Every structure is written in C-alpha cells, then in structure tokens.
Image (cartoon, rainbow, N blue to C red):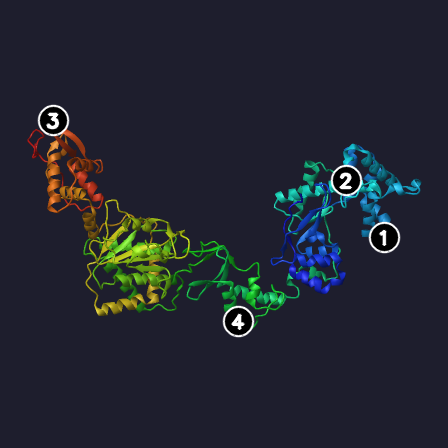
Amino acid sequence: MTRQRHEEHINSKFIDYIIQNNYEQLADYDKKLLPKLKSKNNKVTPLYKKGGVFLDDRNWCTKGLAGLSRKVRNTLAYQHYVDVDIKSSVFAVLVYLAEKYDLDIPEIENHFDNRDACLQKWISKGMSRDEAKKVYAKKPFDNYDGWYDPSKMTSLDKEVKMVQDFIWEHTDFQRDRLYVTKKGQQLHKNNPRGKLLAHVYFTIEWAIVEKAMDFLETKNCFAVADLHDGFFVPKSTENNLLNEMNSFIKNECGYEQITFIKKDMTEFLDIPKDIIENFDVHGQAVAVKEYTELKEQFEKTVGFIHKTKRFIERHADGSYSEMSKDDLINGYEANKMFFENNSFTVFTDKPSPFVRNWLKDCERKTYDDKTFIPSIQDCPPRLFNTFTGFFVEQYQPEIIANTDYDDLNIIKNHIKQLCNDNSSHVVAINEYVLDWLAHIFQKPCERSNSMLIFKAGEGIGKTMFVDFIASMMCNDNKTKYTFKTSKPEQYIFGDFNDAVSNKMLICLEELNKNQQFVDKLKDFVTNDTASVNAKFQQRKEMKVYHRVIATTNNENVICVSDTNRRFVPIESKREKMTVAEIKETVKAFGNPVAMKLFYNELMQRDIEDRDFTDFVKSNLYNRLMATSSNPAMSFMVDYFGVERSCPQYKGDDYVGQKELYVDYKEYCEEYRLNYKDRRDFITFVMSIGDLFKDLHHKKFKTKILTFDFMSVRSYLKKRGYTMAEELDSGNCSEAEEDTPNIDI
C-alpha cells in the first residue's frame, strides 16, 4: 500500500500567475497537473500510487508538488519549504551494499568520498555541474555487457560491473531478477543487470527516505513532496533536528554511509526572485492591505460560528443576531463601510465585493461556538462571548457635580429603607444587601448562592430598585441581562425556559407560598448549571451566573426551614412613597453619574470574607420559620421559648413523656393542626440535635425525657427560632425525690 502523505502548502493564486505568465515554460504534465492543485485554503492533500509490483518500491506522485517538473516545483515550494536530499545518494548506497556483502570497491569509495573532485573532471570537459551530476549518477546503472571493448573500461567501470554481476548472481536478489519495477517487463534483455541494480538501489533509497520521514513525524515536523533521494521540510525546520535525524539513520537504522543535507533550490521558472520568495505580497500588496484593514473593522462585529455553521453579528447596543450566508451577503454586499473600495481579488478569481472575498478567507474570524461568560477577560478567544460588559463599568463621566452626590445619597437611602423593618437589625441587613450587590460586579462569574426576598407594601419602590440594578448592567436595555416574571412556574420551571439564558439577575415578582416550585427554586438559586429548553431546539445543559431577587406583598412568601441557607427574607416597614419622593428617586436612579458613584462604592467593599449563606435573621424570617415548621417543631419552639421550671433527674432537667405529649396534642388541637401519635412524636423529639435522652424514672416508674433546658434553647436559637431573652436556667430548686408535676 502507498504511504499516507501530509498536506502541502501551494498558493493557488501563484498557480494562476504561473499559468498566465509562464505557460510556455511548462511541461505538458505541468499544464495538466497545476489546475488540479488549486484549493480554497491553499492546501493540497497529495496522491501517490505504487510504482511497481513490489510493495516496498517507490511511490509515484500523481497529485502534489512531487508530480511537477523541478522548476515549477521549486518555484511553488520556495516560499514555504527547504529541499533535503541524501548526499551523493547513488554512491552512498553502493558503499552500503559493499560493506554489507564485503565487496572491495576502492574506486567507488573514492568517488563517494571525493564527489566534488570527481565532478570537476566532467565539468572541465565542458559540462555544466548539473550535466556532470546526471552522468555521475547514471554510471552505476549503465549497460556494461554491451561494451564493444571491455579493455577500455576505467577502474570505476570495472568495479561497477563487478557490483552489477554480484547483485545479479546473489541469492538475495534472484526473485527480483524476474521483474522491472516500473513497467513490469521481464529482465531478460535491454541491460538487465543495470536495471536490477537500479531496482535494488531505489528500494534501499526509499527505505531510507521513509525512515527519515517517520523520524521527523515523531518530532512534529512533517515532510512533503518526497521524490527520489529526498523531500521538502518547512523552512522553520532547525538544523539541529536534521542532525538528530542523520544520527538516527546512521546509528539506529544502520545506514552509516547516509547523510541528509539541505540543498539550495537553484532552478526556477523565469519569474523575479522577490515574487517567488513571497508571492502573497506581490502585485496585490495595496489590495491586500486595504482588505486587511476592512477585515479588521468588519470582524469587530461579524464572525462565523463553526458549531452552528451560521454567521453572527454584534449590534451597537450589545445585542447580536445570527444569519445565513445569503443574509450576510445581502446585508453587506453594498454596505456603506465599503463605499470607497468594495472590489477585491484577494480570495476571488474575479473582482468581487469585500464580503465575498471574506467568505472565502480561510483565516476569517471563526468561533468554535457562542457562550455567555460575564467576564470579557476570562472568555477563551475561540468563543463568541455574548456578554459585552456592564454599562456602569464602561461608563466614564466627564464631570461630577454636587447634585450627583445628592442623587447617590438618595440611592443609598432607598436601599436602606427597603431593609428597614424597624428592628435592631436594619444596619446589618443593609450591609448584607450592599455586599450582595457588590458581589455581582466584583465577582460576576461566581454565584452568591442566596436569594434576596423583599417583602413590603405597594408603592415603596421595590421594582424601581430592581430596575436600577438592571440599568447598572445594561442601561436602557434592561432585559439584556435581567429577566422579570410573575409566572416562574411557566417561564423558569416550565417546559420552555430559555428566557433565563444569559441572564445575570432574575426577579420573581409577587412570590407567594402557594407556588409549587420551592424545591426547584432551591436548586435554581445555588446550582452552577441549568437545563435550558427552547422551542424547536434540543435541551442543553448550560453554565449559569444569575442572581435571584424576589419581591412580594404577601406575608407567607415562602417556606423557610431551620436548615435554610438560600432564602434571605427582608421586610420594609416604609410607608408608601409620596409623589415628590417618587420623582426624586426616579431622577436619582436615572442619573448615570450617580450610578457610577454607587458602582465605585460597591467595588470598594471588602467582601472576601462574606459568607452569603450566613445572614441576619429578620423578624420576617422568624415569622416564616414559625409558619413553615411542622407542628411538632412549632410546639417545641413554643414550649422552650418561655421561662419554665423543670424538675431534675440525676442532674438533668426532665419532663414526663406522657405529659409532654398531652401538651403537644392540646397545642395542635388549639391551632387545628394535624398531630403525630405518641411514639412518632417522641421519636421526633429524640432527633432534635441529640439533646434528649429517653429514660425510665425509677422512683415514679414512668418514661421521661432528660435534657438541659438552656442547651435546647441555644440550639433552637441558632437554628433561627425566636427565644425569649434573659432566661437563666430551666433547673428548678426541687429535689429529685419531690413529687414532680407529671401525670403518672
């Protein structure tokens, strides 16, 4: 089978130039082959066929640089490749055979060692160096049996004939005597001994060349255009690598006589040398420069998405649209940005508009895919980032006036009022909210894993606040990075939820406890990825960066458990804003300078140690805890939330199990709650923080639960439940022998 070859760099425009200007210099096979070597990307995959009946024989090129005449091949290859050949390959192989079979050939060895001096003898007779080299290389394959006078043979001729005779008679080559490698005719006439030696030579030569190319491939250097005793390597190939290759051939492969050398290309078509050296910049230098400048401008907005096979255009407002090839041509063929020059032949055969040249440009701006990463610096260059930065980050005010600082104070005060529940926690809650906002802009690629829930009456500016944050992100185009909905069950957790794609802020309006998606909401707040499904598209898993805010007027806004770390309920007791306050706030929120000042303060906040899952428990939070808990837990909070005297047993507080269950049952009946049976209730109590022990009171012969009253209170308080303050202990002064207040 033939060897697999690597792509060859051949400039298609240069081929056109050669056909147009040097056609008369081309051989017939050049004229046929050159048009086949043209490609859109200036790269050709060569084709070879086996050139004889033996698999190890030389492969012949039918498409590629090696199939061209030397002048044409050198002309096309000079800009990109260097020619590497075996030094004195014919005589080197003869010396190799002599050493392998112990032949005495001093004249052949002399010609091998002193090649230049031997060539000079032929040159002195009027031959050119190339003519002398051809005579020199063909001599070992001459027909010495046909000499009319053998006595006139030189010492070299006699040694060559001796080698031919040896090869002919040796058993290693008996099978090879039957065929000629090129055309398959039998070796019984027309210089059979010379042809057999030629066959043996070419077989060994090809084995050496193939091993050399294999070695270079292991070093990520890909040889091309292998022909006879050499091949081309990229011009960037260093001499050290060729030295390593020669050492490998000599020491590892056993061909001590073989040395590859760089060979200067000297034969070219009649074309000025500067064009051959760099055709890319010849003739069209000005056109290429203009095209490149337009391309740089064009690709600021337009690119090609490899995954979708569509073109993408970024608009002035930061949005983008995808289009087909036809749409791109129709939109840009006569675009005003090409008014001065819209006719190029850089990549087209005839003058064509810029966009048609760009479409054929193999180096046009191409993205592997589009993505959304809220950090321009962190986006890989091969991805089209639909995120274009935050408006407030890029905005630079020319002048900052005192009125801008007044508006800044209005903004900060409005946020503080949203956190004002008239409790002692207002400052702490406000600081948490400011840190939460700072996290969006300081660390946009991270999740805060918490959700702000603003509960207040109508008309106090909850929506105005959310819109202000959206404006900080994208000015007037608030929906670019923000999505607001009062139907999350449909647009976020429904069948088609692509509305949340590429968003930084999700606002749930009028959130209430009756909505059946709380468990999904927990994951939506914390998970780094989301399954997104758009109509007529396949569902896909996407990395998400959104933060979540909810606004509501409802008291029972959401279920909050004692393990809650995601939902942060914040209540405002602010009265409805007056018309004057609304106008003042709208003006402040719409002031980009004040917005920038607020952004600067957010960026200066130190949030490195802020844990957003650890937050102040507001009064609203405690109320939600109470209404969200199961009846058994609500009873336990109520039972241990007030001052209570408990009897002691062996140094611990205790209560009778039957008494505690009776109180629990009465509590549930009073509030019309479902209650557990006694066994399940006691099991539940035992599961609370490992604070209770199930014991048998020996004196009163009854089941009791022992505990430390203050430890239970402390545990419940840490879990977010409200406890009455300033209780010292649950221990009573009664001795354990006294009769306790339990129902026996």
Counting residues from the start of the chain, the first of labels 3 and 1 encountered is 1
Instruction: Quarter of the image for the N terminus: give it.
Output: top right
To which residue does mark 2 refer? 200
Please name the amino acid that badge 4 sits on: Ala
Counting residues from the start of the chain, the first of labels 4 and 2 encountered is 2
Label 2 secondary element: helix
> Label 4, label 2: how many angstroms apart (C-alpha)?
65 Å
Please name the amino acid that badge 1 sits on: Met
Q: Residue at x 65, y 56 (%)?
A: 10
CB-based contact (under 8 Å), mark 4 and mark 3: no
CB-based contact (under 8 Å), mark 3 and mark 1: no
Label 3 secondary element: loop
Q: Residue at x 30, y 65 (%)?
A: 589
- The answer to whether residue 91 is seen in the rendering is yes
> Label 3, label 1: how many angstroms apart (C-alpha)?
128 Å
To which residue does mark 1 refer? 127
- The answer to whether residue 85 is seen in the rendering is no
Question: Toward the viewer: 668 or 247?
Answer: 668
Q: Position of residue 24 (x, y in %)?
A: 76, 62
Does residue 523 appear left or right of residue 317 in this picture?
A: left
To which residue does mark 4 refer? 334
Counting residues from the start of the chain, the first of labels 4 and 1 encountered is 1
> Label 4, label 1: how many angstroms apart (C-alpha)?
62 Å
Other residues around mark 4 within 10 Å, as few (<14) / some (14–19) / many (≥20) = some
